[in-house]
Amino acid sequence: MRRGMAAALALCLAFGAEARGVEGERWDFTLPTLDGDRFLSLGRVDGPVLVNFWGRDCPPCVAELPRLQAFALQHPEWTVLLVSTDAPGVARDALKRRGIALPAVRAGANVAGLMRAAGNVGGGLPYSVAVNAAVICRTMAGELSPEDLVRWARACGPAATRGGS
């Protein structure tokens, strides 16, 4: 049991450092929804998107889910997309138990490569990426704070693409 907890904690790094070297790069993917009934393509989502990689056994991941849902409600111009590292049924159940109604997809065996492409070389969770027009604006390893979300909304939202601040 201790090994399992240690492995889960190792995967759940909440060190809050922003990844470097990927801002301004194009990033796109197409993944199946948790239900498997359709596919979602990041590049086809209108407006800014906050992509959040999470796992049900990651305490900081679970802690930030309500904050991400509140952000989506407060910023309807944003899409908050959850990318699960768990099996689809497990992820669906975890979200339902917590009352989280955000769009969610599954990365399957592709999750490490997808995170690496967005600057997360170590694969720690949670990991978030702000994208606007399929271009990476911000990345962060660790739990997003309310202040982080405010900064991201200003830096990567619709006004930022029109030359606003």
Image: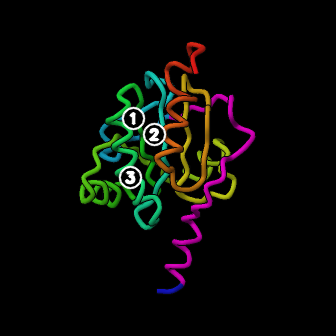
Q: Earlier in the sequence, mark 3 or mark 2?
A: 2
Residue 124: which quarter of the image? bottom right
Label 2 crowding class (10 Å Cα cut-off): few <14, some 14-19, many 20+? some
Q: Residue furthest right?
A: 21
Q: Estimate the spatial distance between the alpha carbons at disc 2 and disc 1, rounded to whole Å.
A: 5 Å
Label total for image: 3
Q: Are marks 3 and 2 in contact (CB under 8 Å)?
A: no
**In this rendering, position of residue 165 left or right of residue 76:** right
Q: Which numbered disc covers residue 85?
A: none
> Secondary structure beneath disc 1?
strand
Q: Are marks 2 and 1 in contact (CB under 8 Å)?
A: yes
Q: Amino acid at mark 2?
A: Leu
The amino acid on which the numbered mark 1 sits, given as a three-letter code, is Phe
Q: Identify the secondary structure beneath mark 2.
A: strand
The span shown in magenta is: 3-29
Does dot 3 land on a helix, a strand or a loop? Answer: helix
Q: Position of residue 161 (x, y in %)?
A: 57, 18
- For the point 47% across and 32% down, the residue is 49
The x, y position of residue 122, in whole percent, is: 67, 58
Disc 3 to disc 2, how far (Cα)? 20 Å
Q: Which residue is mark 1?
A: 39
**Residue type pointed to by label 3:** Leu
Of residue 142 and residue 45, the one placed in the foreground of this image is: 142
Does residue 124 show up magenta in the picture? no
Query: Residue 141: where, in percent of width, then height?
Result: 60, 53
Q: Which residue is mark 2?
A: 31
Determine the CA span between mark 1 and mark 3.
22 Å
